[in-house]
Image (spheres, helix red, strand yellow):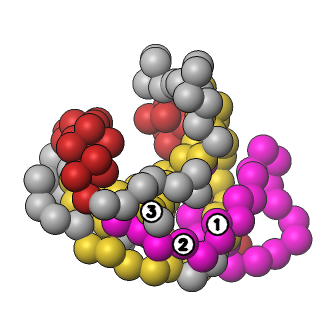
Amino acid sequence: MEEPRIVSKGAFTLIGLEYRGKNDNQEIPQLWGKLLPRFGEFEKLIKSHESYGAARNVDKDSGDFDYLAGYEFAGGEDLPAGMKIWDVPEQKYAVFTATLPTLKKTFKSISENWLPESGYEQTSGTEFEYYDETFDPQDSNSIVLLYIPIS
């Protein structure tokens, strides 16, 4: 695993569809499948076509967490039905590179190897996957950036 970049990112807001659970039955890919066809309903409310898969509120006992598939919110009042808004506060992050096929393995390596050896602690802040405009879900080599909140 490559050493991550350590960055500070200012506060931002996301809009998208929300899920709570463990992703035992591939609910997160299904969530993206529900979000993408609705893009036209909220395209004017977002800053760009870059997307985020954000997670927070992890229950260490059950393994459940909140996940939002969405985009950076530019503002607006009339939210489409079912859309949620998440405010993400300013935070310091360790940024890792992955691909969709290596996502789960990379998260595991971060928590089991990098964090214990790094001198950093993961905070309870929002962690997220960042998909820039070049990301292609059909290309297994397409890059995903993982932002892990640290202190």
The numbered dot on residue 150 is 3
Contact (Cβ within 8 Å) of mark 2 with mark 1: yes
Judging by the rendered image, the residue that carries numbered circle 1 is 88
Viewer-side label of 2, 1? 2
Percent of width and height locating residue 73: 66, 72
Q: Would you say the residues marked 3 and 2 are in contact, meaning their CB atoms lie under 8 Å apart?
A: no
Q: Is residue 23 above or below residue 86?
A: above
| 41 relative position to 33: left or right | right
- Is residue 21 shown in magenta? no
Place of residue 114 in the rendered image (x, y in percent of width and height, measured from the top left): 23, 51
Q: Which residues are magenta?
A: 68-94
- Residue 77 appears in which quarter of the rendering? bottom right
From mark 3 to mark 1, how far is it between C-alphas?
14 Å
CA distance separating discs 2 and 1: 8 Å
69 is within the stretch colored magenta = yes
Q: Nearer the viewer, residue 65 or 44?
A: 65
Give the amino acid at mark 1. Val
Q: Is residue 136 visible?
A: no
Q: Residues within 10 Å of mark 3 (few under 14, many from 20)?
A: many
Label 2: state its secondary structure: strand
Number of other residues with Cα within 10 Å of mark 2, as a class: few under 14, some 14 to 19, many 20 or more: some
Is residue 66 or residue 18 the one in the foreground?
A: 66
**Kind of residue sitting beneath label 3:** Ile
Residue at 82% x, 47% y: name it.
81
Q: Position of residue 30 (x, y in %)?
A: 50, 31
Amino acid residing under circle 2: Gln
Circle 2 residue: 91
Give percent across and percent down for residue 96.
Answer: 26, 61
